[in-house]
Amino acid sequence: MGPSGDHAVSRAIEGDAVRRILDAAGAVFIKDVTTELRSRYAVAATATFALAALAVVSFAVGPFGGRPELLAAFLWTVILFAAAAGLAQAFTREAERRTWLTLRLVAPPTSILLGKWGVNLAVLTAIEALVVPMFLVLFGVEFRSLPAFLAILLLANVGLSAALTLVAALLAQARAHGALVSALAFPLVVPVLMAAIVGTRRAFTEPGVWPPECRVLAAYAGVVVGIGFLLAEHVLDD
Amino acid sequence: MRVIAEGLGVRLSGRVIFENVAFEWNGPGIYTVTGNNGAGKTTLLKVVAALLHPGRGTMRWENSTTAALTPAQARAHLGFAGPEIGLWEDLTALENFAFGARARGLDWSAADGAAWLERLGLTGRGDERLAGFSSGMKQRVKIAFAMLGRPGLVILDEPGSNLDDRGRAVVDALVREAAEHSLVVVATNDPVEAAWGRPGITL
């Protein structure tokens, strides 16, 4: 497909639609991961907030020994605000660097949304890989059920990253993008936040393997991802 | 590719950019869009590229296999290079090309990348990030990016900007070759570029 190719675009468009969407989403994912690894923009914004919040509170207040509900709420508050600080940048950077129109020209809307969501999920997971061990050490947390905690973390990540990505896409070209994403996304993520906090408290205190909140988080993630797929064309078309 | 506009009008922030614009452009070949600064050339190109809905009138895109294309289908069949169409400066030229090709579902290989770099006079610079390129080198890469996969419609907004004589020769050759198989629309105030093809419209 060098300079002497022959109308390869037309042939590619006629291929299998689902495969084309997934291939393009993969291309968006790889492009964003490559640029993120070089600029560390989202990871730096997210990790800085999360680690600073953890350090400040642990030095100021000390361990919340015996208060698992406070520990759970604090952990998810840090994760939520760190995610809001970093994940909204996925679309802002495209607009700031004048690549947003280019992206819309080369990739289908569903692929853009899927690729950006994948990157945000990866960034959030990477941040938690830093934050959670630090949280456990600083606050002396002990688990009754590690599998339950990991399940809550995974399912909440999927829902949280999907909701923030969808709202960020809606506001991709809006002024004051970052502030708007935070303001509009918070009411949407209240269900996932509440379920994650309660589920995490159970993982700290109850030896059961699967807290009922896992079902809530799975349903939330399914609904948000489904809405994203259904609305991608409309969300990104204007 | 065939592009037909009837009664197009765009108003932005309460100001009329243009109104009652009509044309019919049939590819392959080159059509030029001319007009003073601020006349709305870039805005018109965005409408032609299905990146901006006109407030008034209709835009139609047709290719040889489909009677009419939706705006989303039209975007998939066109390439656009201009000041508002940036590339990813944290990526190399080759990585930009590979991304553009893969996002569009095109086959892509290292040989394709090497062929493009040679054509652009950038052999040996493929592993450098775009951020380190001069504005003229970036302009050449942008124009090549718009032509990946030989789209049916190629839109170029001020293609000669930032180019030296060597860069102009490269772009001139690329545009003439593209015009053999695609509809090429060029917005320009440069008399040399304006002479590339038929007058499309003057705003």
Image (cartoon, rainbow, N blue to C red):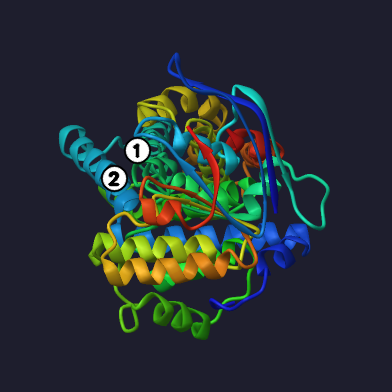
> Could you say which is closer to the camera, residue A27 or residue B61?
B61
Which circle's residue, 2 or 1, is located before the other in the chain?
A: 2
Residue A84 relative to residue A207: left or right: left
Label 2 close to label 1 by CB (< 8 Å): yes
Q: Which mark is residue A45?
A: 2
Chain name for mark 2: A
Name the amino acid type tagged 1.
Ala
Secondary element at tag 2: helix
Q: Residues at marks 2 and 1, common chain?
A: yes
Name the amino acid type tagged 2.
Ala
Where's residue A134, x and y in %?
Answer: 29, 52
**In the rendered image, which residue does mark 1 sit on?**
A85
Identity of the residue drawn at 31% across and 84% down: B124
* Structural crowding at the residue carrying mark 1, measured as other residues with C-alpha within 10 Å and reported as few (<14), some (14–19) or many (≥20): many
Q: Is residue A2 above or below residue A52?
A: below
Residue A138 relative to residue B41: left or right: left
Where's residue B27, x and y in %?
Answer: 67, 56
Q: Is residue A86 visible?
A: yes
Q: CA distance from mark 2 to mark 1?
A: 6 Å
Toward the top, the furthest residue is B14
Q: Is residue A212 visible?
A: no
* Structural crowding at the residue carrying mark 2, measured as other residues with C-alpha within 10 Å and reported as few (<14), some (14–19) or many (≥20): some
Q: Is residue A208 above or below residue A69?
A: below
> Could you say which is closer to the camera, residue B77 or residue B153?
B153
Identity of the residue drawn at 30% across and 56% down: A40
> Could you say which is closer to the camera, residue B88 or residue B133?
B133
Q: Is residue A150 above or below residue A179?
A: below
Q: Which mark is residue A70?
A: none
Where's residue B88, x and y in %?
Answer: 38, 58
Where's residue B9, x and y in %?
Answer: 57, 23
